[in-house]
Image (cartoon, rainbow, N blue to C red):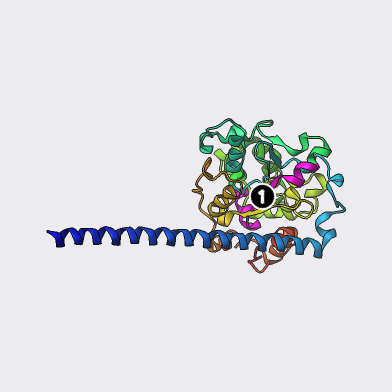
Amino acid sequence: MAAYKGFLQLLRFVGSMFLIMLCFYQWDMSQEKRERIHQLQTLRKQLIRETCDGDKEAFSKGKHSLEDMSDNELKNLIVDDKHGVIYCYVPKVACTNWKRVMFVLNQSKPYHDPMSISADLVHRPKQVTLLNSFPRTEMKAKLKHYTKFLFVRHPYVRLISAYQDKFQRNDRYFYQNFARNILRLYGNQTDPPHTADEAFASGVRPSFYNFIQYLLDPQTEKTVPFEPHWRQMHRLCYPCLIEYDFIGHQETLQEDAEQLLMILKLEDEIKFPPSYENMTSLVSLFDWFREVPLEDRRKLYHLYEGDFRLFGYRKLLDG
């Protein structure tokens, strides 16, 4: 009997030691992960600084400080005064979910699950507080003292996502304002359907190459600046003029979001929504661009070169 009790005590001791070792192992892994992400952030921010310093004119376009920027150029910066956070949103880079998070953080505790907030709500005007709604002196103070972050994505994958969302779906606004003209100018449609409903009922829509032709046409930006869903990311968030504290990538979205919430000391109060969107693989990227001639790929790279260089993306496609 005494031997049996001794055996049970030994088992409890071994079990306790195992749990302690497991906790230390998990702690070590967590520390290692945090250190790795910290180093990655250091490299991302260093790349931006070096790229900006190496070619100031190309990225600043004659703008050297906040005073040189118009209110319209600051319209993508969302402010959370309660937590001292500024988020620059980039369409097609998880911006709906980050807007949900920013919206929820401005509500009273306990915070709601961000996914309980509808996408339509957070995209409505005045549902979030924009930096350009403040006087210039306050803008400058917030940019200096608040934690500033943005998320970016491979430029070509972002273009594919924009095309799928705005031209492969029945979107009345984008059909009337963009798709119909693209069909007329590049799709051999002299008289495209007048409404999105008619176009989609008859299967008429711009091809991906038609979309690329539209982007590459020198006349496109002579009329109006690029629509934000395909405007260059650095022309939405100005990383050479605004020193961001955290640079997230769509390719490491969940890991980066988790780390950012830890930096903000919000990891126990709110969770970033899980991402179920399938990432475009390199194979499918080549499939999308198969019909795009090499010369046009090179022109497209030149058009988005700033985003590639600033955020460390490979150009691929021999562009």
At mark 1, the secondary structure is: strand
In the picture, the quarter occupied by the C terminus is: bottom right
Amino acid type, mark 1 = Leu
- Which one is nearer the viewer's eye here, 172 or 108? 108
Provide residue 188's location: percent of width, then percent of height. Answer: 68, 50
Q: Quadrant of residue 103?
A: top right
The relative height of residue 95 versus residue 3 in the rendered view (above or below) is: above
Provide residue 290's location: percent of width, then percent of height. Answer: 60, 63
Principal secondary structure, stretch drawn in magenta: helix
Question: What residue would you read off at disc 1?
Answer: 150
Residue interval drawn in magenta:
140-164
Toward the front, the furthest residue is 2
- Which one is nearer the viewer's eye here, 213 or 118? 118
Q: Residue at x 56, y 61 (%)?
A: 287
> Can the viewer see residue 197 in this picture?
no
- Which one is nearer the viewer's eye here, 276 or 187? 276
As for residue 150 lying within the magenta part, the answer is yes
